[in-house]
Amino acid sequence: MTTDGGEGGLPERKRGSGVKVVYEMLRDEILNLKLAPGTHIDEVQLAERFGMSRTPIREALVRLAGEGLVETLPNRSAMVATIDVLNLHTFYDAITLMYRVTTRLAAQYHRPEDLVRIRAHQADYAAAVAAQDALAMIAINRELHAAIAEAGRNPYFTTLTLRLLNEGRRILRLYYQSFDDRLPQEYVDEHEAMIAAIAARDVALCDRIASAHADQIVRQIQKLFARDERQRVPL
Amino acid sequence: MTTDGGEGGLPERKRGSGVKVVYEMLRDEILNLKLAPGTHIDEVQLAERFGMSRTPIREALVRLAGEGLVETLPNRSAMVATIDVLNLHTFYDAITLMYRVTTRLAAQYHRPEDLVRIRAHQADYAAAVAAQDALAMIAINRELHAAIAEAGRNPYFTTLTLRLLNEGRRILRLYYQSFDDRLPQEYVDEHEAMIAAIAARDVALCDRIASAHADQIVRQIQKLFARDERQRVPL
DNA sequence: TGCATTTTTCTTGTCGACAAGAATCCGCGG
DNA sequence: CCGCGGATTCTTGTCGACAAGAAAAATGCA
């Protein structure tokens, strides 16, 4: 069986769009864990699936490797980047610092249209929480913080934050697919407070809220990995 | 005239090394401003120069684009990334924060072999200062701070720091090629103090020194751009 | 049977060629 | 003289094919 992804139609597509399509599709599948970490990626298989040559596939993979989403060894198959559980503390450090810095900068440099975008994401987030849709929450959480980072208008920090949000999305996704936990209403409130602080241009308050928010998420992830997965089977 | 770069010899090279060679060569030329910002990059020209097909050239360019060293528009020539003078403050913010964070982390997590590497770079730096070799100083300064970042063992911060150091190398290079200034002996002393603080694992001191060091560099760059380039011609 | 070695198959890295847009040049009209 | 439209050239994006290296399978030997 050839597991067609659903792209098998008219092969007419615009010049230059091929790479973009493959790149975005693969990125989403990696972030959704639809492609499990460690999965070996076969270029010809992807080429057949997307109905194009290996060349654009290759370029998409190189780009994804640049963002740390796939790992590649010479003359060997590329594979979906693994989630390094042992070095998670570096992730905690980085996401905490980036939450703080981008939120502070957003308080300083945001413009009215930024707040509109941010609040739109927050509305989506609240809706996802109400609908108990954990997957949507994870995706929207990323978009919300990305919008805050953009409002800070520092491309260096924005890029790193985006990368960390991607990583975080994979980790959270791991969390919510393993067991359907209560969905944290607190996040909605924390986001609300964060947005208010940004709108009020209160840098110090933003810093405090961002720190707390990051700590919250770190604790949640730690709770996941501390969880005992063994089934208690009567003997 | 075909401006051969000097690669025109036996075309035998190992499989998989092509991309690496092109990538590193182009990266160095961009960082040295041997390729001026804004220069259009012609793929076939590079292919002829390196004696290989366009495919590996292309992959190298995609990688460089991922690091922000070249900018690419669809169906248009890639070009060497421009130095955005108007948004330099974002660079200042980012490099200052990364200097602080990586130095602090180095104080916490460095191992003996890290100090050996760092001190070797520092010796090279001092030698370059003694030799009045500004170009070597610029390159070694990057390596020194890169080694400190590596000692901090947080790949997220290390990656961003490396990117900022690259950008800084281009800017400094711009500086020292415009006029041969006095070479700052102070940097040697500041580096020395920084290394001592790392070795002593004094996080707070590291933070202070890194801040001061970043401010120093920022001021130097600002002095460059504030400089009045007009020639005073008698009328 | 178990292990080392060789052969086969499979996947990637590189190449040359072709087609679609973009940039350039040329001719024409105002 | 200048601007505008079409033809031409030039550059990039994509393709199919081939070769080198790696993984897997098959073979031989103890």
Image (cartoon, coloured by chain):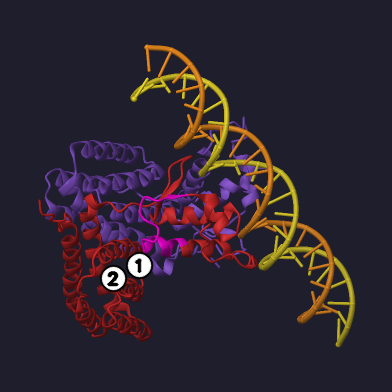
Chain colours: A purple, B red, C orange, D yellow
Distance, label 2 to label 1, CA atoms, is 8 Å
- Looking at the image, tell me whether mark 2 or mark 1 is earlier in sequence order: 2
Horizontally, residue A16 falls left or right of residue A157, namely right
Determine the chain carrying the residue at label 1. B
Return the residue nearer the eye: B146 or A39. Answer: B146
In this rendering, the answer to whether A204 lies above or below C22 is: below
Q: Is residue B38 magenta?
A: yes
Q: Secondary structure at mark 1?
A: helix
Task: Identify the mark at residue B158; answer none if there is no mark.
Answer: 1
The magenta stretch spans which residues? B26-41
Determine the chain carrying the residue at label 2. B
**Which residue is located at x 26 percent, y 55 percent?**
A99
Which amino acid, mark 2? Thr
In this rendering, the answer to whether A116 lies above or below A54 is: above
Which residue matches tag 2?
B102
Labels 2 and 1 touching (C-beta < 8 A) = yes
Return the residue nearer the eye: D10 or B18. Answer: D10
Residue A109 seen: yes
